[in-house]
Image (tube, grey):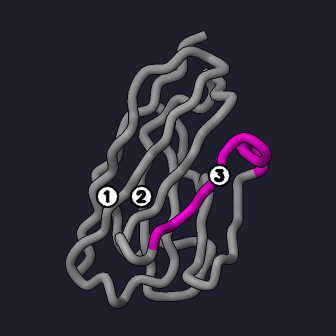
Amino acid sequence: QVQLVESGGGLVQAGGSLRLSCAASGSIFSINAMGWYRQAPGKQRELVAAITSGGITDYADSVIGRFTISRDNAKNTVHLQMNSLKPEDTAVYYCATDRKATIRPVGSWGQGTQVTVSS
């Protein structure tokens, strides 16, 4: 089993930046893909960004050019740098990992971290 702990959420004004981090522990040898999802109130959870162990990335159209996903395999962490934040980015952000080389990791989930962007 993989345990995931997110950090870095908070309140920021529109146009600001936040950096989310997710630390993995447990069966880390099984991790291939890592990614971030978000869920706003009343909406379905959606993929924000994902990255495979081979470095293949995928982003939601709404965050291209503003968000960057990266991973540190030595530290078993994945980060999401979020710039030019908008109020519509407000959501709970979840870290996820998968054994497969997929751009839709769904195997293990973190508890989520709140990101609130004020206008």
Earlier sequence position, callout 1 versus callout 2: 2
Q: Which one is in front, 52 or 90?
A: 52
Residue found 65% across the figure and 52% down from its top: 68
For disc 3, the marked residue is 68
Q: Residue at x 57, y 45 (%)?
A: 81
What residue sits right under mark 1 in the picture? Answer: 110
Query: Residue 58 bears which disc, if any?
Result: none
Q: Quadrant of the N terminus?
A: bottom left
In the orientation shown, which residue stands out farthest toward the front?
Answer: 74
Q: Is residue 53 magenta?
A: no
Residue 13, percent across and down? 56, 15
Q: Mark 2 points at which residue?
A: 95
Q: Which amino acid lies under the numbered mark 3 shown in the image of this protein?
A: Thr
Tell me if label 3 and label 1 are in contact, CB under 8 Å: no
Viewer-nearest of discs 3 and 1? 3
Circle 2: residue type = Cys
Boundaries of the magenta span: 61-72
Amino acid type, mark 1: Gly
> Sequence-wise, which precedes: disc 2 or disc 3?
3
